[in-house]
Amino acid sequence: MLNSVAEKSLARLLMVGSTFITIFVVWGAVTDPVNVTKLLALGGVAGAAITLAISFGARDLWANYKVAIALAVVFSFTVINSVVQSDAPMSQLVYGAYGRNTGLVTYFLLILLFVSALALFQKASFLKVSYGLLAAGAVNAIYSLWVITFGDFIGWTNPYGNILGTFGNPNFIGAFLGMFASVLFALTIKPNLDWKFRAPSIVLLLITFIEIESSSAIQGIVVAAGGMSLVGFFFLRSKFASPLIPSVYSLLVLIGGVIATLGALQKGPLTSLIYKNSVSLRGEYWQAGWNMAEKFPFSGVGMDTYGDWYRRLRDDQALINPGPNTISNAAHNVVLDQLAYGGWPMFIAYIAIIILVTIAIVKVVLRNKSYDFTFIGLAVAWICYQVQSIISINQIGLAIWGWLLGGTLIAYERATRISDSKDGANQGNIGSIKSKKTKQSVGLSPFMVGALGAVVGLLIAVPPYSSDTKWKAALSSGSVEQIEKALTPGYLNPQGSFRYANATQLFEANKLYDQAYKYAKIGVDFNPEFFDAWKMLYYIQKSTPEERELAKKNLLRIDPMNKNIFDVPKQ
């Protein structure tokens, strides 16, 4: 167990760090303002957190959380197994595809965040995690209100016409605001909350509802409604000794949920309000993920490699809706992403972690009927994350909450179990905890330990960000020499399939045919499973007839069901 100074440092780090990861965006200096920046922030926070947790409490972590840590290790091995057995480019497997960045490094850092949260023990520490989510939500709510009122001051491309928050996508901000609204509602109805906090919370909650509607994201409405309904259950349960009223309430909520679900499936009275064509599209993306697991049951297709395999493993129905040229690089379901990336081993390990967290929640619910905002905020937020993950992509700004809250809830269950125990054995344990506090106070300060860990984490996570800044600077310079320099691979400059295709297209459009040919060849060598790499080689002027024929064969190999491949206009 951590000493008091170390735990306070870790709790503050997780509170401020989780907020920072969620809201951190950079524009102007990078081509991807969201994902590479959040990965960089995650590296620093996770590195600092795990170093603090291990340096001041490694022995107790293992002694108290063997199952959780063992599952985290098993999950890590399934990620490594996926990387080792995949033929995709190593940089893609390690750092993820452009615009996603959910490769080995991201999952490794998320696991470290999960394990770090297990080291928390004090109630104030658990509260700080909820406060971190509330702070991130408040920043996004204020920013979104500004966008609705005055327009967006962030200079990024917004093809959606809706609020994007600090996530770069209306679906992501809608889902996160749904999580935020649920936790804020739990705080707002907390008994004995001072009105100087309750009143602004109510105002902020109303603003958040408007913003969820403005996002046009169905998951935002679903998450907010489900999360607030769950908070209502905990509130009623704390007010009535008899289970009758909470049971009736739960039945009504269940009926409403079933009707809403049927509406999403184009059945029942709510179809016109809830159903969107994107629901049908997700069904095709889910099916493709399932097909990938059937083809590669023990390894998956590789980390963040769904997009390379989508064309050849989608169902025939996907050629009708969403259509032959509508492509996805994610299953739009976090659980199915694990299944596609790492096969059944990764899927089972991930589900096992979810089950472990669920067991922790159930244990606390069964032994405590009071309205405990500390627990309710954590549990409702985690459940909301899992609900949105069914129809969403594993975006880093959202993913951190699934892993951080999961570890925190497991730790909370143990901490409250020990606190509630009245037998002498546990009193003895408390005495041993005090003695450890004195022993652990010797050595480097928590700040220094955390700083060292942050440096290591940043070094692990910085390559995609560094590479993107170089690419952006090269594009802005307009210099062929600078662009080619930015295309030279290195540790701080990992390359990707999308960039090579983008460079080929750029050179071809500017009649730099030698360079276009050079990078088209590099692109197909780098990733022969990337459709656009072969498409570039097929269309550029300097390709030989033999190379065009080879490109044609590979295009048909990668997209065998699409009979209209060559109807796609030259890009």
Image: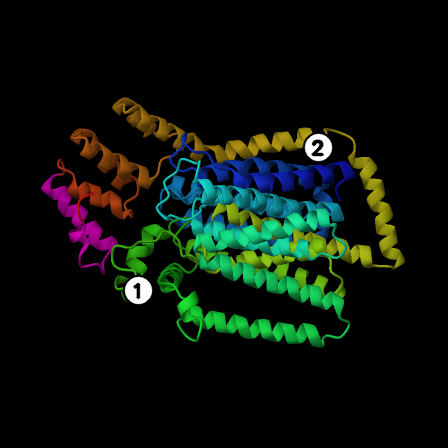
> Is the N terminus in the top left, top right, bottom left or bottom right quadrant?
top right
Callout 2: helix, strand or loop?
helix
**Between residues 276 and 201, which one lies in front from this camera angle?**
201
Residue at which label 1 appears:
315
Q: Image quadrant of residue 292?
A: bottom left
Amino acid beneath label 2: Pro
Instruction: Specify whether 567 is left or right of 217.
Output: left
Name the spot of residue 297 as percent of width and height, x first.
Answer: 42, 60
Residue at which label 2 appears:
446
| Residue beneath the point at 40% across and 57% down | 331
Which disc, if any, is residue 51? none
Name the spot of residue 110 as percent of width and height, x first.
Answer: 55, 46
In the image, farthest residue toward the left = 545
- Most prominent secondary structure in the magenta stretch? helix
**Between residues 92 and 477, which one lies in front from this camera angle?**
477
**Between residues 45 and 226, which one lies in front from this camera angle?**
226
